[in-house]
Structure formats: structure tokens, C-alpha cells
Image (spheres, grey):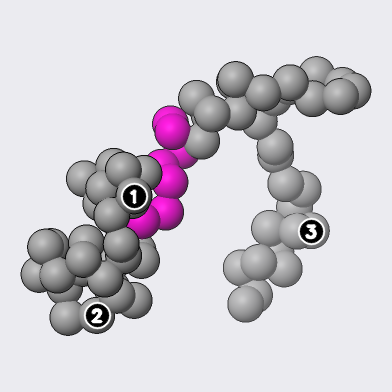
């Protein structure tokens, strides 16, 4: 619901108020686009070169991110 409100142009502070969140930072968690929405948007675009597809990070990158 929060993502749909954001896409409709509703201010983040108003979304936080409507959802009963104490702060906009709490609401931010819910405002990240879900994976399905991202994939639908990416499917509408074309890459200049190469094949479209999902990114798969290598083990080194995953280990680095897990260490953070």
C-alpha cells in the first residue's frame, strides 16, 4: 500500500501519518519497490547491448556485503 501511495504522488510524511508510523524513517522500509515491481519496470526497458536478465552477484561480493 505504501508503495502505491508513493507512486500516486503522496508525500512520504503523509504516508507515515496515515500508516500510524512514529517517523518517516520507519515508513521508508515500506517504500522500497518490491522485486516484482522492479522486474515489471525493467521488462519495459531495453538494454543497449547484451541480454536482459537478473543480476547474480559473485561470492566475493556477497561475502563483502555480509561483512558489513
Q: Which mark is residue 44?
A: none
State the CA–CA distance, disc 1 to disc 3. 39 Å
Disc 3 target residue? 60
Nearest to N terminus: mark 2 or mark 3? 2
Whether 6 is among the magenta residues is no
Residue at left offset 21%, top offset 45%: 1
* Helix, strand or loop for disc 2: loop
Q: Bounds of the magenta span? A: 30-37
Q: Is residue 40 left or right of residue 6?
A: right
The image's mark for residue 9 is 1
> Which is nearer the eye, 66 or 8?
8
Task: Give the class, few, some or many, for how many residues have Cα within 10 Å of label 1's Cα (few <14, many ≥20).
Answer: few
Q: Position of residue 58 (x, y in %)?
A: 77, 48
Residue 3 visible to the viewer: no
Question: Taking 47 as reference, is 3 above or below it?
Answer: below
Element class at badge 1: loop
Q: Which mark is residue 23?
A: 2
Dominant secondary structure of the residues highlighted in magenta in the image: helix
Amino acid at each position: 500500500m505504501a508503495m502505491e501511495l508513493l507512486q500516486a504522488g503522496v508525500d512520504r510524511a503523509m504516508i507515515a501519518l496515515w500508516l500510524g508510523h512514529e517517523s518517516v524513517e520507519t515508513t521508508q522500509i515500506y517504500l522500497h519497490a518490491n522485486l516484482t515491481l522492479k522486474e515489471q519496470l525493467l521488462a519495459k526497458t531495453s538494454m543497449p547491448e547484451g541480454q536482459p536478465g537478473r543480476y547474480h552477484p559473485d561470492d566475493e561480493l556477497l561475502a563483502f556485503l555480509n561483512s558489513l
